[in-house]
Image (tube, rainbow, N blue to C red):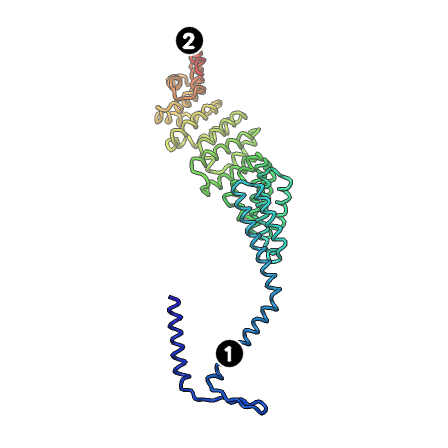
Amino acid sequence: MRGVIWLVLLFTVAVVAATTLGSNDGLVTLYWGGWRMDLSLNLAVILLLGTCLLLMSAVKALYSLLTLPRRAGDWRALRRERGAQAALREALAEYFGARYGRASKAAQRALTLQQDTPQLQPDTEFRTLALLLAAGSLHRLQDRTRRDATLKLALVEGRSKVADEAARLLAAEWALEDRDGPRALELLAALPPGAGRRTQALRLRLQATRMARQPMDALSTARLLANHQAFSPVVAQSLLRALAAEALEGAHDAQQLRRLWGQFDAADRRDAQVVARATARAVHLDAAEDARRWLRPFWDRLSELSRDDREQVALALIEARVGIAGDWLPRLESAAQAFGHEGAVVAAVGMVFAERGLWGKARKLLEQAAAAPALPARTRRLAWRQLALLAREEADETRAQECERAAAMLD
């Protein structure tokens, strides 16, 4: 198609030239000294155009000759630049191919070529990327001394924001693999606020806080990750509960436990699993009154809880029943009527009645709890022992021994 177009243009030029120049009878006369030359106007125009073309070609040739050294230098620099880029791509491919020795060598070759190429020297991102690839390869090779030296260079020379953030995130990840939680937290703290809230940074912070045994910081970080939907709802809930339990286990006295409970997020304090762990810890620290105060809102809205949550709340109340006040009795009677088919609720109500000395109301509930196979063995054993105490209150030693025997048979 292109050839056809050129052919049409050639014919067009020929027609225009024949029409314009064919009937041109003009003459051009040149005088030089005693000489005279007569030329047709057509020939003079052609010679003039040829002379101009020849001069332009001569100027262009002279310019090419004079700029040859610079163009040769640019060509050599372009070759070095392409070599450096090729070495960097090779390092990246070798790194992802798990050939870390080759990746390190290719990255070092890219750095050498970049250093020898003036056009590439201002490119700090290229140098930082090559340094990070080299450091990552050395990390995989367990060469920590050279890795740290290379990483230090990347942090010093990473003048761009993106390169600096990448270097710090990688350094924090490697610190975690080295089991150095404080170092990872230090690197993450140096990130800008926007970068520190990214999902990957939060994941690293969560690991670092857990490694550094900072459960409250880990809990707040896990809460942020859950809000960012970094986990599935089930995994997020399980993780938050585990971290809350870890934080509660770190409390060594009642005052510290109260302060810790006040620092919990409102969502954590509304979690029945968390309040059950807090109750157990409070009872262990002789703060049963605090435990009952934390449990009271759950018993006031027992019908809104799931069956598993009701079981956890009921078992927690069993732990905190010693010294319980009489104002609990109305809500417990209502719970026994509404959830009399759930063994944990029945056991909790029966235990509280027994604690308050209401043996008549407690007997049937305790017998029902002791016979409930779905209850934990510890709760059933406690119910049998309460029945044994009741039998001894009634001077029925035979019945008391039977209850003790039934409790001892539970694993």
Q: Which mark is residue 7?
A: none
Near-viewer residue (186 or 127): 127
Residue type, mark 1 in image: Gly
Q: Is residue 350 above or below residue 196?
A: above
Distance in Å between CA atoms under marks 2 and 1: 135 Å
Numbered disc 2: secondary structure: loop
Where does the C terminus fall, quadrant-wise?
A: top left
Q: Position of residue 220 (x, y in %)?
A: 51, 39
Near-viewer residue (189 or 97): 97
The answer to whether one can see residue 174 in this image is yes
Q: Position of residue 371 (x, y in %)?
A: 38, 17
- 261 to the left or right of 367: right
Q: Tell me where residue 400 sits by quadrant.
A: top left
Q: Position of residue 299 (x, y in %)?
A: 41, 30
The residue carrying mark 2 is 396
The residue carrying mark 1 is 50
Q: Is residue 96 above or below residue 406?
A: below
Near-viewer residue (223 or 4): 4
Q: Is residue 21 above or below residue 325?
A: below
The answer to whether one can see residue 188 in this image is no
- Identify the residue shown where x is 57% and y is 71%: 61
Q: Nearer the viewer, mark 2 or mark 1?
A: 1
Residue type, mark 2 in image: Asp
Near-viewer residue (395 or 129): 129
Q: Earlier in the sequence, mark 2 or mark 1?
A: 1
Give yes or no for contact between labels 2 and 1 (Cβ–Cβ under 8 Å): no
